[in-house]
Amino acid sequence: MIKNIRYIYQSAAIVFASLFFTVAPNQVFAATTATELNQESNDALKTLYHSNPTALELSKKARAILVFPKIVKAGFVFGGSYGEGVLLKGGQMNEYFNSVSASWGWQAGAQSYGYVIFLMSDRVEQSIRNAQGWEVGVGPTVVVMNEGAAKNFSTSTLKDDAYAFIFDQQGLMVSISVEGTKISRIKK
């Protein structure tokens, strides 16, 4: 009985991994041009601001905004996510980053989502630019704003280094977190 369960479990993992690594590269890992990424990021910000007025208010006080318009996450016991984004500073989009995470545990499914991190100080902005890769959750404080937190939030009492909003979730995956995500600069 245990051998049968283990066989089914291993077979499902192999099928899922095969499917992910043959379909996903064409859809997710394909190189997006800087122009396309800029447009996708602008569209993502409009979507976020329309659905969440708190994010719009926060954008007015942020030193810079890091926008990842589409992250794709998939997993079956072992999982990962990937997406590319742009740093917006003073209305200019000219620095590009990727967001990568890996995870393991009880998980199965795939989904896509976007996220935006509002960088509230020059210190946190420079730490992202100067680091070989910034791991969210290590170093500057990042507060993930869910619907409940956003409703009780006031921009007059800002005290954290960065605020993250996750939006436009699609697919079937139990949870999303930016904790443990590594953000690195890329060339476009």
Image: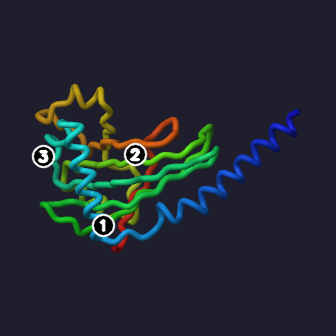
Q: Which residue sits at x=30%, y=42%?
A: 165
Q: Amino acid at mark 1?
A: Glu
From the viewer's perspective, tell me whether residue 169 is left or right of residue 18: left
Residue 176 located left or right of residue 122? right
Circle number at residue 36: 1
Residue 138: x and y in percent read: 40, 48
Task: Determine which of the numbered discs, if any, sits on residue 137 in the image.
Answer: 2
Q: Nearer the viewer, mark 2 or mark 1?
A: 1
Residue 55, given in percent of the width and then of the height, sits at 20, 41
Give the side of residue 85 with respect to residue 54, left or right: right
Residue bearing the label numbered 3: 61
Q: Residue at x 30, y 43 (%)?
A: 164
User: What type is the residue that disc 3 sits on?
Assistant: Lys
Q: CA distance from mark 2 to mark 3?
A: 22 Å
Q: Position of residue 15 (x, y in %)?
A: 70, 52
| Secondary structure of the residue carrying numbered label 1 | helix
Q: Earlier in the sequence, mark 2 or mark 3?
A: 3
Give the residue type that dot 2 points to.
Answer: Gly
Quadrant the C terminus occupies:
bottom left
Mark 2 surroundings within 10 Å by alpha-carbon count, few (fewer than 14), some (14 through 19), many (20 or more): some
Above or below residue 126? Residue 186 is: below
The crowding category of the residue bearing disc 3, from other C-alpha atoms within 10 Å (few below 14, some 14 to 19, many at least 20), is: some
